[in-house]
Amino acid sequence: MSTRNQNAPLNDDDIAELADLIDDAAARTDAPLSLEGVDGFVTALQCAPRPIAAESYLPVLFEHDAPATLFADAAEYGRFEALLGRRWNEIARALAVPIDNLADPRALSPLIMDWEGLLADLPKNEAAALKAEGVPPYASLWAAGFLQVVEHWEADWELPPDSKDEAFVDEMLDPLYVLMTPPEEWTEAERQTSRNDYVAMAIWSCYELRDFWRDRGQAPRA
């Protein structure tokens, strides 16, 4: 694959293909995989205190020692790697650009599933069946994927107890923990802020965390 292709943003067909590949792999493992969760996971890796190689993070993502075996064949796994690599580069570019607001077309735009929109477009019987199965709250899977990285490599994210920056990191992660928490468990104070506002806060946290670790000289230089 050429460098140009590696840097090409994913189009709608690419995103659908990547989602299908992830869903197929999910059927062969117990990991709660989804396109949205994988996107959150990859985003967190780029906001992390240190670089983590694919051979280390893919087994964590898939909860399987040999992720390649979860795909139909080597070609399918190669296609997954290529699409994920392009999404990785897309996220990296977004986080590297200074922006003033999230409406900027260059801003990070997570691959979050619009469940309400999907339900509205489905026939009533199909929508009812999907609701009965349980629809994840908006952005909860993305937040969970992000926090999977934080919690698996927890020691990397911890600062010395006397560090003045410890509270800052906690504050940046807080919107993600709120989004991952079932809405019925939100505190009264948390309910004063809308879910969409928490999503916006979480996206800004990605920029802040990336810059924070880079300023400390600990972040990946991809």
Image: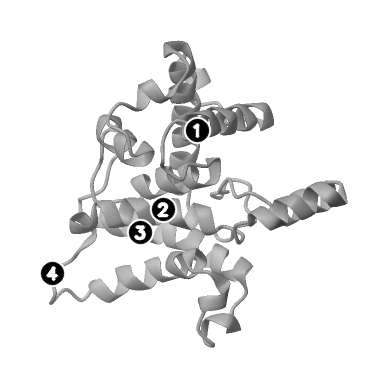
The amino acid at mark 2 is Phe
Label 2, residues with CA under 10 Å away: few <14, some 14-19, many ≥20: many
Q: Do callouts 1 and 3 mark residues in contact (Cβ within 8 Å)?
A: no
Three-letter residue code for mark 1: Ala
Task: Give the amino acid type for the residue marked by disc 4 in the picture.
Answer: Pro
Mark 3 touches mark 2? (CB < 8 Å): no
- Check contact, mark 4 vs mark 2: CB within 8 A: no
**Is 222 positioned to the left or the right of 10 in the image?**
left
Q: Quadrant of residue 183?
A: bottom right
User: Real-space Cα distance between discs 4 and 2?
Assistant: 22 Å
Provide the residue designation for mark 4.
Answer: 160
Look at 52% across and 19% down and name the residue there. Answer: 5
Q: Earlier in the sequence, mark 3 or mark 4?
A: 4
- In the picture of the structure, the residue carrying the numbered disc 3 is 209
The residue sitting at 14% across, 74% down in the picture is: 161
Which of the two discs, 3 and 2, labels the residue nearer the N terminus?
2
Q: Earlier in the sequence, mark 1 or mark 3?
A: 1
